[in-house]
């Protein structure tokens, strides 16, 4: 029972453990936010590249049709 374990600690130990858990939670949240924005960046780059490739082939096909 982890809750009983927390209750039996001395107040200073409980505060310390609570602060450690808060820091771990904040690090996990920060890593998640970083990952989310990094993936948005990567996906937008790939979509931009795909649009450039599509425009290039469309231009190539229009040139072929005009010949």
Image (cartoon, rainbow, N blue to C red):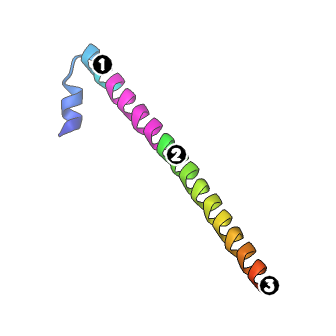
Estimate how packed mark 2 is, as few (under 14), some (14 to 19) or many (20 or more) residues with alpha carbons within 10 Å: few
Relative to 36, is 6 above or below? Answer: above
Q: For the point 77% across and 78% down, which residue is it?
A: 63
Q: For the point 30% across and 19% down, which residue is it?
A: 16
Dot 3 corresponds to which residue? Answer: 67
Looking at the image, residue 7 sits to the left or right of residue 22; the answer is: left
> Magenta residues, as a range?
19-32
Relative to 67, is 42 above or below? Answer: above
Dot 1 corresponds to which residue? Answer: 16
- Label 1 close to label 2 by CB (< 8 Å): no
Q: Nearer the viewer, residue 28 or 58?
A: 58
> Which residue reaches farthest right?
66
Q: Nearer the viewer, residue 63 or 27?
A: 63
Relative to 34, is 17 above or below? Answer: above
Q: Percent position (x, y) of residue 66?
A: 82, 83
Magenta stretch: helix, strand or loop mostly? helix
Q: Percent position (x, y) of residue 34?
A: 50, 40
Residue 10 among magenta residues: no
Quarter of the picture holding the N terminus? top left
Q: Nearer the viewer, residue 27 or 60?
A: 60
Q: Closer to us: mark 1 or mark 2?
A: 2
- Lower position in the chain sequence, tag 1 or tag 2: 1
Estimate how packed mark 1 is, as few (under 14), some (14 to 19) or many (20 or more) residues with alpha carbons within 10 Å: few
């Amino acid at each position: 029972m982890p809750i009983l374990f927390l209750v039996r600690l001395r107040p200073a130990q409980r505060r310390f453990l609570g602060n450690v858990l808060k820091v771990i939670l904040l690090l996990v949240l920060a890593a998640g936010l970083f990952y989310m924005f990094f993936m948005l960046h990567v996906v937008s780059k790939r979509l931009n590249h795909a649009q450039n490739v599509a425009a290039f082939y469309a231009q190539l096909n229009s040139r072929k049709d005009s010949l």
